Image (tube, rainbow, N blue to C red):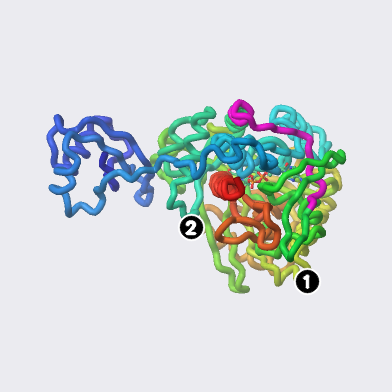
């Protein structure tokens, strides 16, 4: 099989044109082409009226070696690399002499850690503080409609983790030499995701499909001998100290049950603040890390489509357009777009009572009227000095201010972009109708963020207009507050065996531990950590 990159064709090309392009690039006759599959497809929209599709293809021919030799000068032609997943161990703990590994959290990181452990025959126990994805959906939609927050079952907590009610974007900038990302996508397709996620450059799934996929993956884990327990919050961890070495011995659930284990995947996400505090008290090494704060911004999706795709706006292959923006403000802060959701809605993402947090989600169709994205300002531990967990208190204070400014009833505070930049409170919406439920309360958002963030954002919005024409739009709506862009802490682990810096048997993983920043990277980290657990257990067999 040959990998042929950089095959470029117009947006509306036919299958015959693609075949002809392969034949021409390889200088072969039709009889020599046995077939092909698309490995990746992206587009170049720099010329809006002539958008080009760019393919990477896996081509089957009747004479690979000869064709490679004949096209030796084509740097975009090579033997197809083997991207299939290889398990690092089998038959580990076959006699059951060691306690079973435990995975805490069933977000993408925990889900993939548990799946890989189960596929290797290690029969993990998964402890998830929230409910099953169906029950959790009721609680989450209930919060959005009735303003009743369940602190253990919401956008952040429950089966599927934080990304379940999301845009389901499945791409990442991580280095992935072992093609773990492909394993994640392949498992998602097995669980019901559309096959295109394997090859399109910016795949996404949307909320409702994610719900079904999570259930299918749960069934596989259980069928392989895994045990999944919901409403099972880990409230304590027993760490044995002997000869200067700390080793995990057991976990205690909120209801008092003790579970003996010596291998724990800690995949608790970035919102498990009570669990972070418990781990800190038990002496697990934690340090503060940078994150970002800001607002969700909504524009008409049609405006973003027209700006990015011109006459090709609305083309089914392109779908709803996204954008990516960065501005380096004169006060030294970076302002950037984060988790952009084309054709989606802004959602209430709080997990603690009396606090307001925003995020974004969409369905697979991305057909809602507004485009939304977080526009955030980078902050670092110098902004919340003193204690490794100080970033959490910083987040809490901002979320409380947002709750109060919204009217203390889970409405979110909002403002028109033009008014925010001009420094006056908003009193009336324009053409952009905000999508956040239960409601957006117009006010002056400058009062809830630190001065440096307000200054940087006021500079960035007009500057973004140069990158996406029309972006600095008076009646675009800002909704507050984005505080959970990434974890405010890092639970540091060793590079070699992925165990906590000072606690053996504890494998910090995913977004909460500071090792992932999205669904795909969290899934990839779950795979890496599952391998580390298997190798550690194999060494003790
Ligand atoms: P999480 O998904 O946060 O999962 C952690 C799990 O641990 C939770 O289910 C929680 O209940 C459980 N837990 C916590 N503490 C305990 C405890 N003590 N005991 C037992 N269980 C516990 N990313 C993308 O890549 N694309 C997107 O489109 C996207 N959209 C998003 C939209 C929204 C609304 C949100 C909130 C996030 C979105 N993200 C998106 C981010 C993405 O969801 C996260 O990066 C990802 O879920 C992190 O995975 P994780 O497994 O590390 O943690």
Q: Residue at x 85, y 52 (%)?
A: 404
| Res 272 seen here | yes
Q: In which quarter of the image is the C terminus?
A: top right
Left or right: where 378 falls relative to 250: left
346 or 119, nearer to the observer = 119
Q: Where is residue 371 in the image (x, y as percent from the top left)?
A: 57, 43
Task: Relative to 137, say whether 74 is above or below.
Answer: below
Q: In which quarter of the image is the N terminus?
A: top left
Question: Magenta segment, which residues?
Answer: 220-238
Left or right: where 401 falls relative to 324: right
Secondary structure state at the residue bearing disc 2:
loop
Q: Dot 2, crowdedness within 10 Å: few (<14), some or many (≥20)? A: some
| Res 361 seen here | no
Left or right: where 351 falls relative to 517: right
Q: State the image quarter where residue 166 is shown.
A: top right
- Taking the image in four quarters, ligand 1 sits in the one at top right
Q: State the image quarter where residue 257 is shown.
A: top right
- Determine if the C-beta at disc 1 is less than 8 A from ligand 1: no
9 or 330, nearer to the observer = 9
Which residue is identified by label 2? 467
Secondary structure state at the residue bearing disc 1:
loop
Q: Find the distance from the CA under tag 2 to the CA under tag 1.
A: 38 Å
Q: Which residue is drawn at 48% across and 58% down?
A: 467
Which residue is identified by label 1? 386
Q: Number of marks in the image? A: 2
144 or 212, nearer to the observer = 212
Q: Do the residues labelled 2 and 1 touch (CB within 8 Å)?
A: no
443 or 222, nearer to the observer = 222
Mark before the other along the chain sequence, 2 or 1 = 1
């Amino acid at each position: 099989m040959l990998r042929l990159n950089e095959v470029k064709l117009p947006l509306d090309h036919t299958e015959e044109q693609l075949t002809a392009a392969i034949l021409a690039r390889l200088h072969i006759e039709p009889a020599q082409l046995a077939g092909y599959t698309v490995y990746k497809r992206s587009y170049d929209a720099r010329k809006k009226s002539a958008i080009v599709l760019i393919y990477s293809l896996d081509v089957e021919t009747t004479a690979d070696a000869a064709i490679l030799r004949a096209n030796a000068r084509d740097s975009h032609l090579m033997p197809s690399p083997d991207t299939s997943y290889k398990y690092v161990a089998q038959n580990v703990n076959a006699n059951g002499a060691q306690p079973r590994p435990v995975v805490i959290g069933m977000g993408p990181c925990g889900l993939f850690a548990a799946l890989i452990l189960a596929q290797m025959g290690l029969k993990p126990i998964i402890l998830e503080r929230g409910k099953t994805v169906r029950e959790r959906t009721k609680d989450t939609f209930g919060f959005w409609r009735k303003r009743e927050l369940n602190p253990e079952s919401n956008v952040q907590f429950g089966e599927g983790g934080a990304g379940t009610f999301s845009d389901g974007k499945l791409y990442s900038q991580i280095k992935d030499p072992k093609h773990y990302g492909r394993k994640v996508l392949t498992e998602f397709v097995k669980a019901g995701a559309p096959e295109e996620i394997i090859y399109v450059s910016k795949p996404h799934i949307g909320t409702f499909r994610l719900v079904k996929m999570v259930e299918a993956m749960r069934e596989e884990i259980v069928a392989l001998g895994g045990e999944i327990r919901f409403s099972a919050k880990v409230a304590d961890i027993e760490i044995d100290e002997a000869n200067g070495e700390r080793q995990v011995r057991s976990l205690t659930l909120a209801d008092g049950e003790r579970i003996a284990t010596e291998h724990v995947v800690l995949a608790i996400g970035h919102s498990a603040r009570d669990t972070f505090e418990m781990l800190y008290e038990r002496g697990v090494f934690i340090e503060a890390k940078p994150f970002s704060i800001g607002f969700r911004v909504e524009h008409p999706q049609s405006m973003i489509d027209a700006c990015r795709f011109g006459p090709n706006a609305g083309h089914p292959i392109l779908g709803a357009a996204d954008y990516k923006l960065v501005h380096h403000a004169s006060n030294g802060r970076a302002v950037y777009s984060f988790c952009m959701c084309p054709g989606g809605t802004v959602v209430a993402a709080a997990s603690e009572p009396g606090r307001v947090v925003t995020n974004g989600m969409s369905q697979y169709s991305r057909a809602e009227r507004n485009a939304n994205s977080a526009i955030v300002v980078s902050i670092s531990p110098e902004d919340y000095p003193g204690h490794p967990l100080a970033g959490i208190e910083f987040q809490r204070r901002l979320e409380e201010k947002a709750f109060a400014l919204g009217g203390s009833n889970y409405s979110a505070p909002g403002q028109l972009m033009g008014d925010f930049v001009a420094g006056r409170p908003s009193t009336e919406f324009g053409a952009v109708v905000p999508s956040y439920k239960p409601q957006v309360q117009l006010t002056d958002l400058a009062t809830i963020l630190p001065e440096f963030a307000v200054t940087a954002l006021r500079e960035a919005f007009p500057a973004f207009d140069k990158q996406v024409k029309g972006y600095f739009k008076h009646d675009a709506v800002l909704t507050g507050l984005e505080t959970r862009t990434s974890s405010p802490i890092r639970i540091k682990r060793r590079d070699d065996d992925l165990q906590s810096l000072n606690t053996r048997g504890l494998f910090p993983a995913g977004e909460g531990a500071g090792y992932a920043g999205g669904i795909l990277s969290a899934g990839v980290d779950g795979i890496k950590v599952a391998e580390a657990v298997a190798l550690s257990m194999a060494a003790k067999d």
